[in-house]
Amino acid sequence: STTLTLDGFVRWLESFRARIDEQTAYLTELDSAIGDADHGSNMARGMAAVMTKVGESPAATADELFKTVGMTLVTSVGGASGPLYGTFFLRVGMAAGPVSECDAAALAAALRAGLEGVVARGKAEAGDKTMFDALSPALDAMDAAVAAGASLEEATAAARDAAATGRDATEPLVARKGRASYLGERSAGHLDPGATSTALLFEALAEVTAA
Ligand code: ADP
Ligand code: MG
Ligand code: MG
């Protein structure tokens, strides 16, 4: 389809939640190497709370939906990832506005507003070994695809692939933000947990736009 509807947004969240649930132990294992071994459980708890809230009070517009998602993540996840993912979704919703669907260009713009929220909150830059390093290249790839006239499915597939490449590229990096930065050089040689969960977010998005 050429647009992602409200139902599609909810399926995106469901698919992200399912991936987080499947990979909770893996995400926590990654965080045990360079953090405090809670990224999987943080994200699983947050997305469980999100799906409960979304089920209880169905939204009529994208801004309402993503406001609920963002607020729920901020309030239910104690770690850094709660406010960061929460701010991401809050900004995505504000940028999307009171609409019931988004085409590829509108979706790309909304997701970029989300990235800007993450940066405003956490001050991460490229190469700091954070979720930024999956998110930012994903959105660059999505923008490039949209500019080249790609379909929604193609643009989100490009974003998914770039997020995975960005995730993999965090392995050799020395962390400069978050708990992993306390390890200094010892943080090198491990994937960043947040970049890994962000790659799952884009796997989920590409899956729903292809369905
Ligand atoms: P905590 O570090 O509080 O235990 P999590 O383990 O849930 O929280 O999340 C850790 C992830 O958060 C990191 O892998 C990184 O991707 C992300 N992160 C941490 N600090 C920042 C930041 N300042 N900007 C962007 N992302 C960050
Ligand atoms: Mg942690
Ligand atoms: Mg923690």
Image (spheres, rainbow, N blue to C red):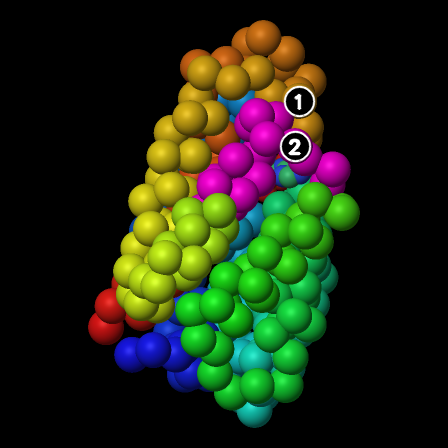
Residue furthest left in the image: 211
Q: Nearer the viewer, mark 1 or mark 2?
A: 2
Position of the N terminus by quadrant: bottom left
Q: Is residue 129 magenta?
A: yes
- Of 175 and 30, nearer the camera is 175
Name the residue: 43% across, 34% down: 166
Cβ of mark 1 under 8 Å from ligand 1: the answer is no
Instruction: Give the percent coordinates (x, y) of residue 174.
Output: 57, 16
SS for tag 1?
A: loop
Compared to residue 164, the image places residue 178 above or below, namely above
Residue 85 badge: none
In this view, the residue farthest toward the bottom is 60
What secondary structure is found at the residue carrying circle 2? loop
Looking at the image, can residue 67 be seen? yes
Disc 1 and disc 2 in contact, CB within 8 angstroms = yes
Amino acid tagged 1:
Arg
The residue identified by callout 2 is 125
At which x and y percent is residue 102?
Answer: 48, 77
Q: Residue at x 57, y 39 (%)?
A: 132
Residue 40 at least partly seen: no
Task: Give the mark nearest the N terminus, 1 or 2.
Answer: 2
Coordinates of residue 42 in the picture (x, y in percent)? 56, 49
Q: Can you tell which quarter of the image residue 206 is in? A: bottom left
Tell me: residue 46, above or below residue 2.
Answer: above
Q: Is residue 193 above or below residue 81?
A: above
Most distant residue in the top direction: 185
